[in-house]
């Protein structure tokens, strides 16, 4: 496995924890397969944190590009407020 800087390691771990960042995005940016990401997380995290992360991402469809229901653009919840010119619109 390639040696990463602290900044890169932090970003990989952050992306792995994010619900909507698929493993494919991490693979594209850091050239890591899903199994490599799992090994890195196991190595870099406390055992309890690693177990919590694994439980969280297993079966989560948003972590796999092929299983996502939306293909283009960004996901936006129908209940999310509209944002116009960097200010939240009022009701």
Image (cartoon, rainbow, N blue to C red):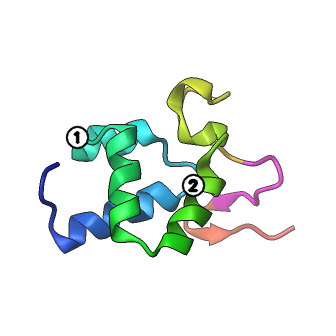
Label 2 or label 1, whichever lies nearer to me, is: 2
Q: Identify the residue position indicated by label 1 in the image.
A: 31
Crowding at dot 2, Cα within 10 Å, few <14 / some 14-19 / many 20+, comes out as: some
Residue 36 visible in the shown view: yes
Crowding at dot 1, Cα within 10 Å, few <14 / some 14-19 / many 20+, comes out as: few
Residue drawn at x 16%, y 61% is: 4
- What is the x, y in percent for residue 51? 57, 63
- What is the x, y in percent for residue 46? 45, 75
Question: Which numbered dot is residue 57?
Answer: none
Query: Which is more toward the observer, 87 or 60?
Result: 60
Does the magenta stretch mainly form a helix, a strand or a loop? loop
Task: Report whether 16 appears left or right of 1.
Answer: right
**Quadrant holding the C terminus:** bottom right
Q: Which residues are magenta?
A: 77-83
Task: Report whether 23 appears left or right of 1.
Answer: right
Vertical side of 85 occupied by 54: above or below: above
Which quadrant of the view contains residue 12? Answer: bottom left
Q: Identify the residue position indicated by label 2 in the image.
A: 54
- What is the x, y in percent for residue 31? 22, 40
> Secondary structure under badge 1?
loop
């Amino acid at each position: 496995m390639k040696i990463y800087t602290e900044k890169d390691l932090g970003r990989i771990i952050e992306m792995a924890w994010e619900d909507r960042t698929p493993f494919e995005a991490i693979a594209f940016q850091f050239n890591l397969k899903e199994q490599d990401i799992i090994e890195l997380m196991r190595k870099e995290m406390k055992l309890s944190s690693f177990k919590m992360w694994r439980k969280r991402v297993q079966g989560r469809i948003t972590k796999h590009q092929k299983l996502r229901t939306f293909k283009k653009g960004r996901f936006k919840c129908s209940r999310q407020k509209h944002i116009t010119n960097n200010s939240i619109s009022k009701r």
